[in-house]
Amino acid sequence: MKIQRINSIHSPLADDLETLYINAFPSYERKPFETLFSHQETGFAEVFAITEDERFIGMISTLKSSQLIFVEYFAISPEYRNLGYGSKVLSLLKEKYPDVNICLEIEVVQTDEGIIEERLRRLKFYEKNGFQQLNMIVNLFDVEFELLGTSSEITFEEYFILYEQIHGDSFKDKLYLIK
């Protein structure tokens, strides 16, 4: 399995990435697809395709600083889910950044039973792969997320800085700590 950086929307894998991105993330959580690539120009973001034997398996998009890697988007194609690929990707990411903490967001529990079950499955998956709840709930563009990380030492300030590096001062009112 390979994780390869995709530098352009014109890459041969960009269509696969875009299809998965649109199908895996609700519209209120997505930014324009082209923005994933333009953010790479800052040096603080990366978009990767996950492949195995020339088959497209999934995607991962990260924001990065010297202290923290933030998994912004991570999805495995439906036909490859529950086959261990997600765990393999997280292991490869930890190997790629051995001296840096990694964090990500998951949706906060809502009242819809299907959403609760999905969130609990997602939480269990990440905990199985070495992530822990950081006891931080954030509001990002009016959507609440819980932060998970590979270390309890991760702070809201470190997480906030990643977004600020990409979006500048205009971002300050779009992301805040709830708890």
Image (spheres, helix red, strand yellow):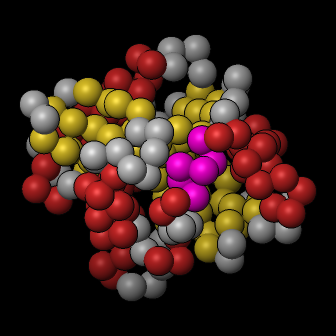
Instruction: Look at the picture and state if 88 lies above or below 12.
Output: above
Residue at coordinates 39% horizontally, 85% vertically from top-left? 112
Instruction: Look at the picture and state if 170 lies above or below 101.
Output: below
Quadrant position of the C terminus in the picture: bottom right
What kind of secondary structure does the magenta stretch mostly adopt? helix
Residue at coordinates 70% horizontally, 23% vertically from top-left? 66
Q: How far from the left and from the top, in percent, is residue 166?
A: 73, 48
Inspect this view and state whether residue 119 appears: yes
Quadrant position of the N terminus in the picture: top left
Q: Nearer the viewer, residue 12 or 111?
A: 12
Residue positioned most to the right: 169
Q: How far from the left and from the top, in percent, is residue 174?
A: 78, 68
Residue at coordinates 29% horizontally, 64% vertically from top-left? 19
Kindly indicate the quadrant of the structure image that contains residue 45: top right
Instruction: Look at the picture and state if 53 lies above or below 59.
Output: above
Q: Is residue 154 magenta?
A: no
Residue interval drawn in magenta: 35-40
Q: How far from the left and from the top, in percent, is residue 172?
A: 86, 61
Residue positioned most to the front: 10
For residue 13, side relative to residue 135 (left or right): left
